Image (cartoon, helix red, strand yellow):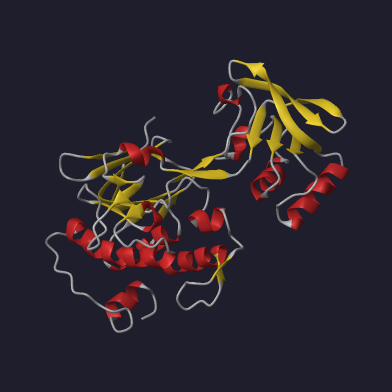
Amino acid sequence: MTNPIVETDVVIIGAGPVGLFAVFELGLLDMKCQLIDILDRPGGQCAELYPEKPIYDIPGYPVITGQELTEKLMEQIAPFGAEFHYSRMVTQLEKLGDGSFRTVTDEGEEFHSKVVVIAAGGGSFQPKRPPVNGIENYEEKSVFYSVRKMEAFRGHDLLIVGGGDSALDWTLNLLPLANSVTLVHRRDEFRAAPASVNEMRQKVAEGKMTLLIGQVTELEGENGELSGAQIKTAEGVVAVKADRMLPFFGLTMKLGPVADWGLELNDNLIAVDTEKFESSIPGIFAIGDINYYPGKLKLILSGFHEAALMAQAAKKIVSPDERVIFQYTTSSTKLQKKLGVA
């Protein structure tokens, strides 16, 4: 069964702070948005790489964390009803004969829109592959770098590798579903939230899961189906039964499929003008860290400015026959009604 085509005004690729603020600017001009992000939640780099790291250059906030900024932006754009599609990568982007765009994800979802906004930071987050020989033979069959559907792991013997929040969170969340869970980390210190670490240790003490301090050195199985792994520990090599493995070794930034979309690039960044932040393909805009123009500053506040100008240009494409009168949110009753504050 094929997925139904989603029709919308604007597809935004990337749900980091700049992509989120773009929803606000587009929403003020009555444009509906669908957002696609490779992560499993909004916030982009702010939420994934430094959720608790303080940011000091957001206007009006002497200090705010990446997670707090994400939450404030989600609250700000709530009136516009944008729809989010997480844990998805855009694999195809093409211009159709009528000038609109067809965007396809790795889940087979298809979106048709008049405008596409690329707000993907430095590119897409790609998981770091553990240094285990032959692991690529098991990927997407029994080795996975993210959890899209928890039910897919029900009844399996899970091997989870890592010591950060993702590793600990999924260890605890999948424990009730799995047949068995073994957590492996190279040292007995964890970078995850202390409450999660304490809960994990309690589960180990209760005999509900296994914790091994060491490294995965070898995988066992055939035809992409995992059956077990060898773990090198200080006491020697331990054989672990596992038919599903979840390695969480962090993320790296890569341009990814964007490189194949026919856009003019400048050192792996999308070249744009400074009037509309439009790419070399009319109707495709790039805002935030993914774009390049003379004088570019990779700051969140710069991306907010780019989103505002992009939205004005996008409106002319989405509604070419509509005369747009520039209005201020402080004085426009019409805009205040959209925001639910009138």
Vertical side of 285 occupied by 208: above or below:
above
Vertical side of 335 occupied by 32: above or below:
above
Q: Quadrant of residue 321?
A: bottom left
- Quadrant containing the C terminus is bottom left
Q: Quadrant of residue 233?
A: top right
The residue that appears at 70% across and 52% down in the rendered structure is 192
Is 259 situated left or right of 211 in this image?
Answer: left
Q: Is residue 21 visible?
A: yes
Vertical side of 337 occupied by 105: above or below:
above
Residue, far bottom:
331
Q: Nearer the viewer, residue 242 or 59?
A: 59
- Quadrant containing the N terminus is top left
Q: Nearer the viewer, residue 53 or 150?
A: 53
Q: Nearer the viewer, residue 262 or 307?
A: 262
Q: How many marks?
A: 0
Is 109 situated left or right of 282 in this image?
Answer: right
Q: Position of residue 298 (x, y in %)?
A: 41, 60
Q: Is residue 42 visible?
A: no
The residue that appears at 58% across and 60% down in the rendered structure is 51
The residue that appears at 67% across and 44% down in the rendered structure is 167
Q: Position of residue 118 (x, y in %)?
A: 34, 51
The residue that appears at 32% across and 78% down in the rendered structure is 329
Q: Position of residue 46 (x, y in %)?
A: 52, 59
Q: Position of residue 155 (x, y in %)?
A: 69, 30
